[in-house]
Amino acid sequence: MTNTLAKGGNAVLFSAVCRVTLTSLTTGIDVSAVLLGQDGKVRSDDDLVFYNHSSQDGVALNGQTIFADLTSIPTTVDSIAVVASIDPELQAAHFDATELDWVMSEPFA
């Protein structure tokens, strides 16, 4: 099953394993994920998954795709925010989130 999400969107998951891919045709982006507790805060610096720390507690980054195995995520993690930011290595005049494509798929192969 594949869902296309709008900025700030969410979707019901029907399997324990999923992936979220973010793409932009007009802006170079870095994709990351933030593991959040019930208070909406990270438990520690390790809860940021990005190019230099590509996996944590069942969440992994590969390119512009975040993979999540929900059975491996600790119960202290309440939600996962998937984030796109401008890649500082690429030229970008502006960042327009409406130009992002967000695709969530489950299960992944």
Image (spheres, helix red, strand yellow):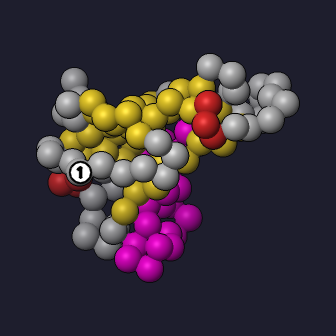
Tell me the residue at 21%/42% (across/down).
17
In the depicted structure, whether residue 39 falls above or below residue 18: below
Q: Nearer the viewer, residue 75 or 52?
A: 75
Left or right: residue 94 compared with residue 103: right
User: Quadrant of the image for the C terminus?
Assistant: top left
Residue 33 seen from this side? no
Residue 20 seen from this side? yes
Q: Is residue 12 magenta?
A: no
Quadrant of residue 79 within the rendered picture: bottom left
Q: Nearer the viewer, residue 40 or 24?
A: 24
Q: Is residue 33 magenta?
A: yes
The magenta-colored residue range is: 30-55
In the depicted structure, whether residue 96 falls above or below residue 28: below
Crowding near the residue tagged with mark 1, few <14, some 14–19, many ≥20 C-alpha atoms within 10 Å:
few
Quadrant of residue 102 within the rendered picture: top left
Residue picked out by circle 1:
12
In the depicted structure, whether residue 8 falls above or below residue 104: below
Kind of residue at badge 1: Val
Q: Position of residue 15 (x, y in %)?
A: 14, 44
